Amino acid sequence: MSGNRYRPRLADGELAPMPWPVSLYRTLNHISWPLEEGSSRWTVSFEKLLIFLGFLVFCEHNEVDLHYLIANWENIDNMLAGMPTYLILVEMQIRCFQLATHKDRFRTLLQRFYKEIYIVEKAEPILFSRIQKQMLVTRVNSVVYLLALLNFLVVPVQNVIYHRRDMLYKQVYPFDNTWLPVFIPLLGLNFWVGVIITSMLFGELNVLGEIMMHLNARYVQLGQDLRRSTGQLLVESGSWSIASEYRRTLTHIVRRNAALRKFGERVEEEFSFRIFVMFLFSTALLCALFFKAYTSPVNNVAYIVWFLAKFMELLGLGMLGSILLQTTDKLGLMYYTSDWEQVVHHSDNVSENLRLMKLVTQAIQLNSRPFCVTGLKYFRISLTAVLKIIQGAFSYFTFLNSMR
């Protein structure tokens, strides 16, 4: 089935280079990653069956995790031991299967991204290198998430050493789950759910980060191309034609700008709901993880690593969102400071000068509002939004700690 999963291609038809977290996301997560366009009907039907079975597995985990919370609701320490896994399970069930129902739309977005937006290293080595540096935090976060998953694998080892039959997560089953023919498949499903959740966490972060930073680089290119064209016109063009030539150049830049904004709106449509769900659960999740890590750090190494991963995920996403927000916020200033007044000063064509000044005004108005990805229009992805979530999580932690 992995051979039928969509593999991005560049505009020239070559396979697009994929960062290792995105490649791992494509390999491990059959629920979220789309199939190749034109896959056979049998392949599509089989994938839908696997998604349905996966949804049932998530529902089963949802129920037994909830049973654990209900059984331990009078003991805050025990209850909070199962709260993080339950919260992340519910969040990922919503995000994964919402994406599973819109795979074709997601594939279309990726196709457009790699054909129109993606910065090829050979063409723009400096911009590409800058993008890789900006994405470093998401790469490190992927490693930390994988370490968090590996921490849960300590449980099977402990089961063998101490002759126990514990599940990977805090769960209460309505039947005897320690019977070996039942225990082994359930433990395998525990691990499968962990792989799907972890790959979704770092995979979607890296996909969205790549899209935002390459889109940011395209906006940076607009300013570079406009300044370069203006300098050439001021040196090479005559006084009668300079205004009309600059207007044609500026028109082309504005059209590219509008195309980038339309693509950004498409990105917003694809990711807005899942970002909203992620931020919605983040405060409670950070609070529960920090509480377990703070109250018993020696016995809760998995929670410490998981807390660091979630903390880095939010900070990384907020940082990338702020970079895109700052770049698009300066677009209006970019047009205003593009030396158009020097072009008007050197031009003897009064009518073309007037048309040029109107176009500059329209370009500034077009970028009066900076573009950014939001969570259902309730908040912008930025460091400011992330810091508010962290502040809220710390406030809830202080309250819970005072109740102990």
Image: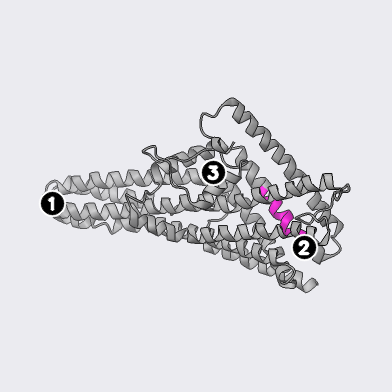
Q: Which residue is mark 3?
A: 270
Q: Please state the horizontal and vertical placement of residue 40, each as a whole percent of the image.
A: 56, 27
- List the single residue furthest toward the bottom: 402
Residue 382 seen in this snapshot: no
Assign the magenta stretch its main secondary structure. Answer: helix
- Residue visible at 41% across and 54% down? 216
Q: Which residue is mark 2?
A: 80
- What amino acid type should be assigned to the residue bearing mark 2? Leu
Residue 199 colored in magenta in the image: no
In this view, the mark in front (2 or 1): 2
68 left or right, relative to 191: right
- Residue visible at 70% across and 40% down? 54
Residue 186 seen in this snapshot: yes
Tag 3, which secondary structure?
Answer: helix
263, 168: nearer the viewer = 168
Q: Which residue is mark 1?
A: 236
Query: Which range of residues does the magenta coloring cover?
Result: 81-92
* Mark 2 vs mark 1, CA separation in Å: 70 Å
Q: Please state the horizontal and vertical placement of residue 308, each as a whole percent of the image.
A: 62, 65
**Mark 3 or mark 1: which comes first in sequence?**
1
- Residue visible at 54% across and 43% down? 270
322, 18: nearer the viewer = 18
**Mark 2 or mark 3: which comes first in sequence?**
2
- What amino acid type should be assigned to the residue bearing mark 3? Glu
* Mark 2 vs mark 3, CA separation in Å: 33 Å
- List the single residue furthest toward the front: 161
Quarter of the image where one finds residue 313: bottom right
138, 258: nearer the viewer = 138
Tag 1, which secondary structure?
Answer: helix
84 left or right, relative to 326: right
**Mark 2 or mark 1: which comes first in sequence?**
2
